[in-house]
Image: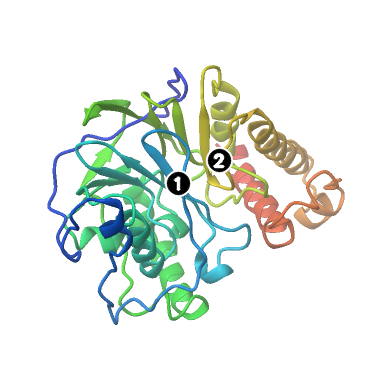
Amino acid sequence: MKNISYSLLISIALFTTACDRGVAQQSSGNAASLKKFTLKPDKRYPQSKAKMTLQKVSKHVYYIQGRAGAATEHSGFISNAGVIITPKGIVIVDALGSPSLARQMLQKIREVSDKPILKVITTHYHADHIYGLQVFKDMNVEVVAPAGTWTYLASQNSKDLLISRRMTLGPWINKHTRLVKPDKIISKETTMTIGGVELTLNYIGSAHSDGDLTVYVKNDKVLLSGDLIFEGRVPYIGTDDTGHWLKTLKAMKTSGLAVLVPGHGKALHQPNAAIKLNFNYLSLLRTKMKAAVEDFTSFEEAYDGVDWSQFKKLPAFKQANRGNAYRVYRSLETESLK
């Protein structure tokens, strides 16, 4: 059942302490020793060449910003990840697009904190957010995911895509890269306090993916939106419910929000412009493709007849727009038959 419940579009997962195994010994905790921490090399995971920075946005929340581009560009480093550091331990939000990137993120985390990693929350199961999960799974960290994840994992597309990415993103995606199953599924709003930091996981349902959720850090008034929000680039549309996605964006409340960390792009202190851009883009797609389906207009004719000028200069437009429009056209054809 699709659920839009917002008091800032908040979210969280249930957390229990997990052993941080698989990592080199914890450092003593002072700044100098943390800076010297280095992960042991692992032949399964070639070192990423991405330039990665762990940016602090509030007292407890950091994030890593991927680069704007298509999925196979920049060694797969195109999505964001969040890091929530509490006195009790660390919660990671999304795991980046390869195990090598996840290990690089882990190195960055260990340069600022030696606390145990308690959970990895996935905002949704898309390749650029989940291929790094196995690094944390192998450390016995619990993986929390939204309902709809099993639909993705059972799909032929998820299997075919992994095979394809081994070719297009090798050596970072390779024979050792695997799809990781979640340990816990979230299907409703769930809240818990970890080390005095209150988190809320809000289950959105199928919007951008087969199942989406957001994470809200109440103490800091920071929302990690996952791919409900793309900042500064054209959104990617897969097998999404764009109608529900639009309703979600329309219902999103930002009053009192200090920072929004999107699934792609920079953290936002004033997120309304990014929300509006995503809403306008999805609205244009649905409006034009719906009219074409109702009029029995071919996709090619419909696509060529749309004025895309307001979005043409955005990153990823050339790579994503036509495919986005086609998938919306096909989904609306299916909707029309119901």
Q: Secondary structure at mark 2?
A: loop
Viewer-side residue, 274 vs 310? 274
Name the residue at 54% across, 59% down: 78
Q: How many marks are shown on the rendered structure?
A: 2
Residue 215 position, x and y percent, is 39, 34
Residue positioned 26% across, 41% down in the render:
185
Give the amino acid type for the residue marked by disc 1 in the picture: Tyr
Residue 62, above or below 5: below
Mark 1 — residue? Answer: 63
**Disc 2 marks which amino acid?**
Ala
Q: Which residue bears the numbered disc 2? A: 267
User: Position of 310 compared to 105: left or right?
Assistant: right
Q: Contact (CB < 8 A) between labels 2 and 1?
A: yes
Earlier along the polypeptide chain: callout 2 or callout 1?
Answer: 1
Residue 260 drawn at (x, y percent): 52, 34
> Is 299 above or below relative to 17?
below
| Residue visible at 36% across and 24% down in the picture | 219
User: Is 138 left, or right, of 72 in this rendering?
Assistant: left
Closest to the observer: 288 or 204?
Answer: 204
Which element type, helix, strand or loop, lies under badge 1? strand
Residue drawn at x 24%, y 46% as measured from the top left = 119
